[in-house]
Image (cartoon, grey):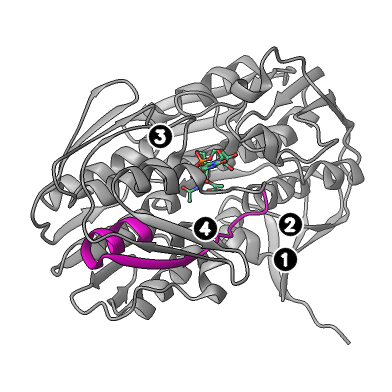
Amino acid sequence: MEKFVINGGKPLKGEVNISGAKNVALKIFVASLLTNDELIIHNVPHIRDVFLLLEVLEHLGSKVIVNEHTIRIRSNHIHKTLVPLEVGARLRTSSLVLGPLLVRYGEATIPNPGGCRIGIRPIDRHIEALRQMGATIEYHSEDGYFYAKAPSLHGTTVTFPKNTHTGTETLILAGVLAKGKTVLKNAAEEVEVDDLISCLIRMGARISRPAPRTIVIEGVEKLHGTEYSIMPDRNEEVTFAIAAAITGGDVLVHSSQRNNLVAFHDVFTKAGGIVIEEDTSITRYKAGKKLLATDVVTEPHPGFMTDWQAPWAVLMTQADGKSTIHETVFESRFSYVRQLNKMGANISFFDPKVPNPTEFYNFNWQDRVEGYHQAILITGPTKLHNAILEMEDLRAGATLVLAALKAEGESSILKVEQIDRGYEKIEERLRGLGARISRVREDFA
Ligand code: EPU
């Protein structure tokens, strides 16, 4: 077990390069199951989720070669169609293999997906949509597996009842080789979905977005290999932007995803943050004279992403006044609040008045835990002090690192494997900006 030891209070200054996007890399790996040819993928981040998914693919029979940030995958000898529980349950994205395995091999058995502890996160929308394409899928609660079969998948029109990012990707990955035309309505618009689409088009798929929230896929006989470079991770950029602003620093971000961060920049600048366009792919972030309380409501793209709300909360602990965060995508993504309060933040929960919660929220309303609140009120500015903290999910982990970088004194953050799931060597990159952070092996006597 490892922990981070952070001595806060130092302004972060310097330059940092953004890694490839986790939420694209994982899906493109899965796309390799759609062809016998080799897929060469560049700009792959070295993070735990990447290696876990490669383990899943190797278990199925794919050959994987890792060379720095380039990964070559060839899936011409798939000999298993079952994802083992021990890997699959740790990585939600492993459920994405359903589409390619069904469309190419007629069967797939996957464990109920795990991943971040940010809610129940069912995959009912994926399953229902695949059934509409001709799959038979049964869930066996006694062993926790979905058993799926499909002699062939056929195109159809699927209307998702609510937004689903990976659900849309599952259907795209099934539709590209299905018979006929698949039309996805109310499909996710996250830019990471588009990066997957671009790679699939390079592999010979026929996919278009003729209207907002509509994706049309013309099934083809066969896909071929290609080389593809993954887009930079905009969630990482948000983390570094907040790190700069919260510590009174000045950070130059290379491989910036500025054009895909409009919703973030809107509130960041409203809150007193400064964004300077230095070059097409270089953006400078720093704090203005004063941070101001600013309310946010999370939404699917193009809104303020749910992935940004936890780091945003740390920024708001330093802003002048009362700010609110209303989480509408996941039913349980405030695990960090107790930890920030432990450090001296003043954050309380409340329930916003919503006319029709069943429709308003992106999660299934019935999955909500009784008594759990969907919004927080942050009163700032508050002085943050050191503490011993524990990460419960990836973005909450990044949030605690940010808080410790701001706090006075030495903090320890346990369970760093959570942050390793999505950020490559975060401590080295933060040190490059002047942070006093080290990774320490925890010894239990
Ligand atoms: N949902 C259902 N049933 C479904 C699908 C989704 O109830 O069949 C619910 C989810 O539980 C959630 C909401 O609907 O409450 C939205 O879920 P969505 O499917 O859009 O999210 P996801 O695919 O599970 C991906 C990213 C998340 C990111 C969200 C929002 C990956 C691997 N994960 O999750 O990333 O927050 O979309 O864009 O792409 C992260 O990187 O830390 C992370 C959690």
* Gap in angstroms between the C-alphas marked 4 and 2: 18 Å
Q: Hey, what amino acid is under mark 1?
A: Lys
- Mark linked to residue 391: 2
Q: Nearer the viewer, mark 4 or mark 3?
A: 4
* Gap in angstroms between the C-alphas marked 4 and 3: 18 Å
Examine the rendered structure and indicate whether residue 98 appears above or below residue 318: below
Whether residue 165 appears in this view of the structure is: yes
Q: Hey, what amino acid is under mark 3?
A: Glu
Q: Hey, what amino acid is under mark 4?
A: Arg
Q: Which residues are magenta?
A: 97-118
Q: Earlier in the sequence, mark 2 or mark 3?
A: 3
> Looking at mark 4, is its residue's CB closer than 8 Å to ligand 1?
yes
> Looking at mark 1, is its residue's CB closer than 8 Å to ligand 1?
no
Which of these two is toward me, 46 or 328? 328
Q: Quadrant of the C terminus?
A: bottom right
> Answer yes or no: do the residues labelled 4 and 2 have beta carbons within 8 Å?
no
Give the residue pinned by disc 3: 190
- The percent coordinates of residue 308 (x first, y second) are 60, 36
Query: What residue is shown at x 78% (from left), y 41% (from top)?
Result: 369
Give the residue pinned by disc 4: 92
